[in-house]
Every structure is written in structure tokens, then in C-alpha cells.
Image: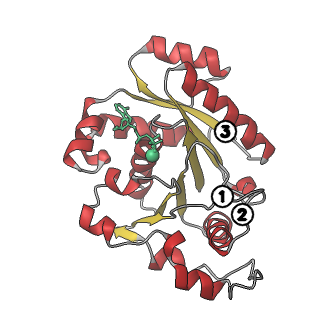
Amino acid sequence: MKIAISGKGGTGKTTLTALLGHVFLKEGNKVFLIDADPDGNLGVALGFSRAELSAVKPVSELKDIINQRTENNGSGFFKLNPKVDDIPEKYSLKKDNLHLLILGILKRGGGGCYCPENTFLKALLRNLIIERSEVVIIDMPAGIEHLGRGTAESVDVLLVVVEPTLKSIQTAQRLTSLASDLKMKKILYIGNKITGAPDIKFLEENILGKLAGYVSSSAEILEAEKTGSPVYDAAPAALKEASSIREKLFENQ
Ligand SMILES: Nc1ncnc2c1ncn2[C@@H]1O[C@H](COP(=O)(O)OP(=O)(O)OP(=O)(O)O)[C@@H](O)[C@H]1O
Ligand SMILES: [Mg+2]
């Protein structure tokens, strides 16, 4: 099962990634949660301490390994299919069977940057999405450029998180068209910070489709941000809503 989660900044991508990750974990799965947001804080939502988080380097900063594996010697030529299959295990933070892998920053360059770091990150995502059998959930920024063609097609479902605001809907629409350019198989919309039926109605009227599920506005989620406890422990009602979302992922397929 390979899930990518995207949406406008602040809509709740990280919260949903943590909640769904826990749902899959409780079903007995080994789960890889991938923080693909350069300014990500998935580790905090999962309740890892500052000390634990500062002890791991994002993959994009593993310079020596990236140079070695891509055989980069600065000549401008490097290997496009570096070995990466050991990276998810070796460089993730672990809590039971839940693994957190922090990708770091995808470099931008004029016309796309074919540098060793990006090649390595893309190979890693290809490995996670195409070659592994575990549950992989990727917390993405509001763009989905990490997923190259080929890899994006193998994602089972893209969840687009929408808040009941026009701005969030606008981003969702942009993402939908990007996702269809990338030939992604399935796109589902998930409402977040829902305060009642009118919010759901507003979203469904504006995204031109039904929501696959939603998470209600929750004081417990906000409180977890202050205490640093894992959001799935701090917000049981939201976790229950995430379980219903999980059940909807493969309906009508
Ligand atoms: N259902 C909810 N009810 C109340 N607050 C929420 C809810 N979901 C998320 N939040 C809060 O909204 C803020 C943004 O959530 P989150 O970090 O999950 O969003 P994001 O889309 O990952 O943001 P970013 O784009 O910054 O990575 C956080 O403070 C979070 O605690
Ligand atoms: Mg986030």
C-alpha cells in the first residue's frame, strides 16, 4: 500500500500522515512514514523527542553516501540508479514497527536539477513506492514534484487534504491536474478541521466530488502540538476518523 498525502500548506497533511500511519501499524503492518516536506515536522507529530530528531540527518544531507552511491566525482557524470535499498532501514527513526524517514531538501535548479542529491532522493522514492511491500505513506509539500513520472503512477492513492476554505480548494484543484498529468491512479479528497455538516457541503460543492472522509476540528490535536505527544495518542476521536478514512481507501476499486 503506497499513499501520498498533499494539499495546501497548513491543511493537515502531517497530522493525517501520523494518524493513518498509526492505523496501519495497529493492523499489524510495518509502516514507513516519509517526511518529504523540506520544512517538515512529521517527527514531532509522531511524538519523537527533540533529541531523537536532532540525532538523525535528513537523507539529502548524507553527502558521503550520496557521492559514493552515485559515484559522483564532480565531473558532472554520475550514476542515475544508485543503490538505495538499505537506506530506509538504516536511516529511519523507529518506534515499534513504525519507521520515520526524513528526506530533506530537494534542490531546485534552472530547468530541474539533475544533481546527485535529487537523483538519490528520487531513486529512494522509487524504491519505497515500487520495490517494497511495506505500507509507505508520504507527507508531501503542496507540490508533488518529488514523484517523478513512473514513480507517481505506482502510488496507489493520492490523498488531497482540504480545509473548508476557497484557498485550500484552489490548491486541491491545481494538485488534481498535476496528479492527472503524472498519471496517478486514484485521487481522493479528505476534509480537515471540519466543524459540521455545512463545511462538508461547502467542500463537496466546490471540489466537485465527494469527500472520501474527514477529520473534525479538534482541540486535542492542537493540544498535542503543545505537549509534543503523538497526535494519535492525544486525539482518539481524530484517530477513529482516520480509521474510517482508511476503510474508504479501497472502496469502488
Ligand atoms: N483536525 C484538526 N483540528 C484542529 N487543528 C488541526 C487539525 N488538523 C491539523 N491541525 C493543526 O493545524 C496545523 C497544521 O497542521 P499540519 O501540520 O498537520 O498541516 P500541514 O499541511 O502538514 O502543514 P505544513 O504545510 O506546514 O506542513 C497544526 O497546528 C495542527 O495541529
Ligand atoms: Mg506538514
Quick check: 208 above or below 232?
above
Point out residue 124 in the picture as x, y percentages from the top left corner. Answer: 62, 70
Q: Which residue is mark 3?
A: 187
Q: Are marks 1 and 2 in contact (CB under 8 Å)?
A: yes
Question: Badge 1: few (under 14), some or many (20 or more) residues near its Cα, within 10 Å?
Answer: few
Q: Amino acid at mark 3?
A: Ile
Query: Of marks 1 and 2, which one's residue comes earlier in the chain?
Result: 1
Point out residue 137 in the picture as x, y percentages from the top left corner. Answer: 53, 55
Question: Which residue occupies 29% across, 60% down?
Answer: 48
Q: Which residue is mark 1?
A: 108
Please indicate whether residue 227 sits to the left or right of residue 105 in the image: left
The answer to which image quadrant residue 142 occupies is top right
Point out residue 102 in the picture as x, y percentages from the top left corner. Answer: 46, 64
**Mark 3 to mark 1 CA distance (whole Å):** 26 Å
Quick check: 76 above or below 31?
below
Question: Which residue occupies 23% across, 50% down?
Answer: 229
Question: Which residue occupies 22% across, 37% down?
Answer: 223
Considering the numbered disc 3 on the image, is that residue within a helix, a strand or a loop?
strand
Q: Amino acid at mark 2?
A: Cys
Considering the numbered disc 2 on the image, is that residue within a helix, a strand or a loop?
loop
Q: Are marks 3 and 1 in contact (CB under 8 Å)?
A: no
Q: Amino acid at mark 1?
A: Arg
